[in-house]
Amino acid sequence: MPFDPGSIDKNVSPGSGVVDYKLQRLHFLKSIETGEIDRSEACEIHPELLRVARSVAPLLGRNCPLCDDGQLRIVAYVFGPRLGGGGKCVVSDEELQRLAKRSGDFVSYEIEVCPACCWNHLIRRYPLD
């Protein structure tokens, strides 16, 4: 289930709390392992997401679950007022904190990305408070 910034549900309430996608990730990986889902589907990636992962995204500290060679990186996008339809890519905690202090409801989406094989999966969504 590749992440695409344009696919964000605009009707998500910022106050809906943290949503963790670990179980969905495990199910997706199991489906790849059993052949229900082709591996190439898991490695479809939006070009901007890949560019950010390769150039500025911090390391996650884990190897890729598919290729086991690539170091996973974490890419975060924040959506909210005055950030445009594609949201804002956030690459540091300081930048995230600055956005959290602005007025309005903001939601952050964190995606793990392997720059080597292009694996990507949404891992967490949470409101900025």
Image: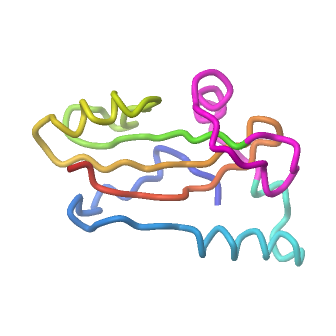
Q: Position of residue 45 (x, y in %)?
A: 68, 43
Residue occupying the point 57% across, 50% down: 3
Residue 105 in picture, x, y percent from top left:
18, 48
Tell whether 104 sits left or right of 25.
left
The residue at the far front in this view is 61
Name the spot of residue 77 as percent of width and height, x first.
43, 40
Residue positioned most to the top: 55
Q: Is 46 in the magenta? A: yes
Pick whichever, 69 or 28, lies toward us: 69
Q: Judge by depth and name the residue closer to the eye, 111 or 72.
A: 72
Count the marks: 0
Q: Residue at x 64, y 61 (%)?
A: 1
Which quadrant would residue 118 be assigned to in this image? top right
Q: Which residues are magenta?
A: 43-71
Residue 101's image quarter?
Answer: top left
Residue at (10, 38) in percent of width and height: 103
On screen, residue 12 above or below 75: below
Specify the color scheme. rainbow
> With respect to residue 30, does 88 lie above or below?
above
Measuring from the top left, give residue 47's x and y in whole percent.
65, 32
